[in-house]
Image (tube, grey):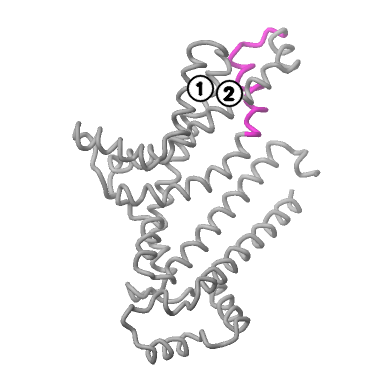
Amino acid sequence: MQRFIITRLFHGVIVVFLAVTAVFFMLRLTGDPVLLFAPMDTSAKDLEEIRERLGFNDPLWVQYGRYMRDALRGDFGESTRLHRPALEVVLERMPATMELGITALVISLLIGIPLGVLAAVRHGSVWDRLAGLLAVIGQAVPNFWLGLLLILLFAVALHWLPTSGRGSWQQLIMPATALAAASIARYARLARSTMLDVLRQDYIRTAHAKGLAGHTVLWRHAFKNASISLITTTGLEIGRLLGGAVVIEQIFAWPGIGRVTVQALLNRDFAVVTAAVVLFAIIYTVANLLTDIAYAWVNPQVRLS
């Protein structure tokens, strides 16, 4: 197990390294980096002074080495809008994004998996068709459109929930639900298909023949084996939730990393954008590492391979 974790950790470091490198070259492939954040009326002389001060006149490999050295220390530059370290600006928004993402993930698991299990157990029934319909709708409707519908219904029409902000559980309900909708659909479809495969296995029929209670066979034997696929999917879902949070945070004015990243893009504050992208890569890598460890713990054959 220790060797497995070290191998996965090494792979994660490589992913983060590639993400940091990609950000560096993407910024320079757009042209002169100084033109991206300098005011439009900046004179040619001032532009040249900025290039010299920031080291953009140095050879590319020198810039890359300096960039990686600073990145290892967590130094991505200073925000041109807030005049504070970029990483500090992003990290102070991290709790809000984590709160939204974890809540959405929990909602997805608590609704999507039971819905899929119910559809598998009641295969071919009205419950099965209803679960399939909800799964299709959940994946077909964009999360931003669902977010707007929730605002119109529960905030504008019914006045039940606030439209924006953070600070109370009422303000969390709509953004977390809008963010979780597609994940609920994916979990439901995966749980249904996986459970149908498991319930057809011989050892399930043997368990029933031994006289075990139906709920014992369902949850202790069938679901335990079906959960392996669900654990694997969770790592991917975390990445999807992080990506979806960028849009949802804008709609509901949720003060997270996604919102500050969009604001930084609009203000051409690329130090903050760089810090946010790198932090997203680290979160995604850590989440997948934990998923791999959980998968290996449930299925020991993975450690051997």
Q: Viewer-nearest of labels 1 and 2?
A: 1
Please tell me in which quadrant of the rendered image residue 21 appears: bottom right
Q: Nearer the viewer, residue 195 or 28?
A: 28
Left or right of residue 293, residue 48 in this image: left
In the image, what residue occupies the spot 62% across and 11% down? 213
Q: Seen from this angle, which residue lies furthest right?
A: 304
Whole-percent x and y of residue 267?
Answer: 34, 68
Q: Which residue type does callout 1 highlight?
A: Gly
Which segment did they paint magenta? 210-229
Q: Earlier in the sequence, mark 1 or mark 2?
A: 1
Left or right of residue 223, residue 250 in this image: left
Residue 213 vs 224, above or below: the answer is above
Residue 208 vs 295, above or below: the answer is above
Q: Is residue 5 magenta?
A: no
Whole-percent x and y of residue 49?
Answer: 42, 91
Left or right of residue 24, residue 4 in this image: right
Q: Secondary structure at mark 2?
A: helix
The residue to which callout 1 is attached is 132
In the image, what residue occupies the spot 54% across and 42% down? 237
Whole-percent x and y of residue 287?
Answer: 57, 50
Please tell me in which quadrant of the rendered image residue 147 appears: top left
The residue to which callout 2 is attached is 192
Residue 119 vs 165, above or below: the answer is above
Q: Are marks 1 and 2 in contact (CB under 8 Å)?
A: yes
Q: Which residue type does callout 2 highlight?
A: Arg
Q: How far, Cα to Cα, is label 1 from label 2?
A: 9 Å
